[in-house]
Image (cartoon, rainbow, N blue to C red):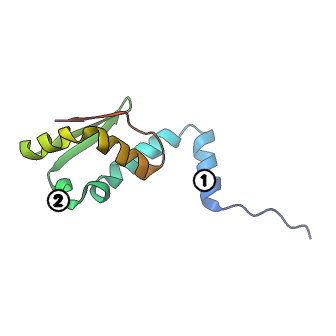
């Protein structure tokens, strides 16, 4: 009996997603789902909606004070979110 080289299931799934052109939508989904964890539950409670279009994250917030604070830290947040996912998913954030 011949031994086959073992591969991790996660690597196989990731390779399939890449080959089928699903890597970008999957990473966008992961970024949106990670928002409460990366930003904290306090900010997530004031978040009404998240969408990604053309590498821009659109965030609808219920608080103008939080919106102003996040706008000041926008560049750092883009880096933090992309770093958490491990891929360049977004280039900018628009707070609404």
Nearest the eye: 69 or 7: 69
Q: Earlier in the sequence, mark 1 or mark 2?
A: 1
Q: Quadrant of the N terminus?
A: bottom right
Residue 54: x and y in percent read 38, 28
Residue 68: image quadrant is top left
Residue 75: x and y in percent read 30, 38
Nearest the eye: 87 or 15: 87
Closer to the eye: label 1 or 2: 2
Residue 82: image quadrant is top left
Q: Residue at left 24%, top 59%?
A: 40
**What residue did someone put label 2 on?**
42
Q: Residue at left 21%, top 60%?
A: 41
Residue 83: x and y in percent read 42, 48
Near mark 2 (Cα within 10 A), the count class, few <14, some 14-19 or many ≥20, is: few
**What residue did someone put label 1 on?**
13
- Alpha carbon distance from label 1 to label 2: 33 Å
Residue 49: x and y in percent read 22, 44
Label 1: state its secondary structure: helix
Residue furthest out toward the right: 1
């Amino acid at each position: 009996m011949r031994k086959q080289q073992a591969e991790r299931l996660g690597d196989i799934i990731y390779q399939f997603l890449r080959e089928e052109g699903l890597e970008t939508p999957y990473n966008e989904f992961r970024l949106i789902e990670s928002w409460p964890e990366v930003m904290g539950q306090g900010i997530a409670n004031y978040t009404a909606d998240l969408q990604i279009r053309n590498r821009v994250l659109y965030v609808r917030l219920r608080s103008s004070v939080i919106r102003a604070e996040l706008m000041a830290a926008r560049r750092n947040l883009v880096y933090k979110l992309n770093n958490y996912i491990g891929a360049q998913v977004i280039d900018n954030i628009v707070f609404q």
